[in-house]
Image: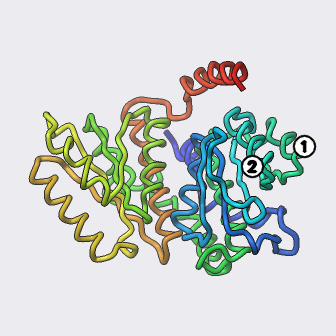
Amino acid sequence: MDKKLMDVYVSDIAHHMKDFYQDLTFYKDGKVDMLDIENIIFLGIGGSAISPKIFTEIMNVNKKVYFFSILNGSENLPDPAKSFVFAFSYSGNTVETLKSVEMISKNGFKGVGISSGGKMIELCENLNWQHISVPSGRAPRAAMPFTLSILFKYALVNNWTEYDESDIWGEIVRRSNIKNKYLPEVDFEDNISKRIAFKLANKKNIILWGVESISKNIAYRFKSQLEENAKQLSYYSFLPEASHNQIVPISLVDNKEDYIVLIFRIPERESVLLSTIISTVKTFLNSEGIEVMDVFGFGENHVLAGLDLIYATDFASYYLALLKGIEPEPIEPIGRMKVILNDNLRKVL
């Protein structure tokens, strides 16, 4: 795969955010009248749902946050007058999300639908919800720069986070060429994405651990990227939880040379307690014959270090696909399953 094709595949986060964020027009005069919001509700499933999870993790949002892939009518929802809903469906036609928007709106909730088109536009218009369009023609997993930009704008303009807009955004703009260190022309020794892919290509069982409140959702995104881009099944958990449950079956497996554990770390965010737990777990797994690889993200703050981790792992998922001789883009089983699922849901909803 050449550089041009890699540019098409990889969700070039900082590069696309740099322009899309500044062009957003859903607010007037730089302000959104949402300063009294206490609760944020996210609706979405699959690739459309990962952005809000990463956003809340790396931005340290000072609101109570709710995540729903689909509403079933029995949820304990907060006060609609103090809440705002973000509904994500890249295609705009995800039945589960559209039905959830219809359901939550009946309870008096207001919000915004985010899609590249589809039925979401008409639904938002009928409900008097806002709609924000993101560029079409991408796989949902490659739309994250645009959905993250929208969430960043809401958070930074409305002071939902400890970070300042000028500081954060100026650094993201300066980092818009950060992907260069992961590109194909960068030598193996200097390219962490290639080294990750090489390690994974020689293992049959891949275990991904994030760290709670630091990299849990970034590790989960990598799991999704491995499954869709490299068609590689993997296992996911996060520390310290994983050290009390998943470590049991891992230590008892046969053919331990077929296993590897990746731990996604942002050192500046780790307390002494967390660092000690991670070090102890690594030592224990090594003594059990299980290989462990640290994957670090670096940056002046949680946001930038998180983006660094996402870049490194996104590229790694594509390099692994290449090593396996697999075309990254097609996800035919998902499309086939969605046709069946949508037909079945229309029968019962």
Q: Label 1 is placed on what type of residue?
A: Asn
Q: Is residue 169 left or right of residue 279?
A: right
Residue 105's label in the rendered image is: none
Front residue of 182 and 232? 232
Q: Is residue 224 visible?
A: yes
In this rendering, the count of numbered labels is 2
Give SS at disc 1. helix
Give SS at disc 2. strand
* Percent of width and height locating residue 19: 72, 62
Q: Can residue 135 be seen in this view?
A: no
Judging by the rendered image, the residue that carries numbered circle 2 is 114
- At label 2, counting other C-alpha atoms closer than 10 Å, the crowd grade (few under 14, some 14-19, many 20 or more) is many
* Percent of width and height locating residue 288: 10, 49
Front residue of 52 and 19? 52
Q: Which residue is drawn at 84% across and 41% down?
A: 123
Q: In this view, does 261 lie to the left or right of 316?
A: left
Residue 126's label in the rendered image is: 1
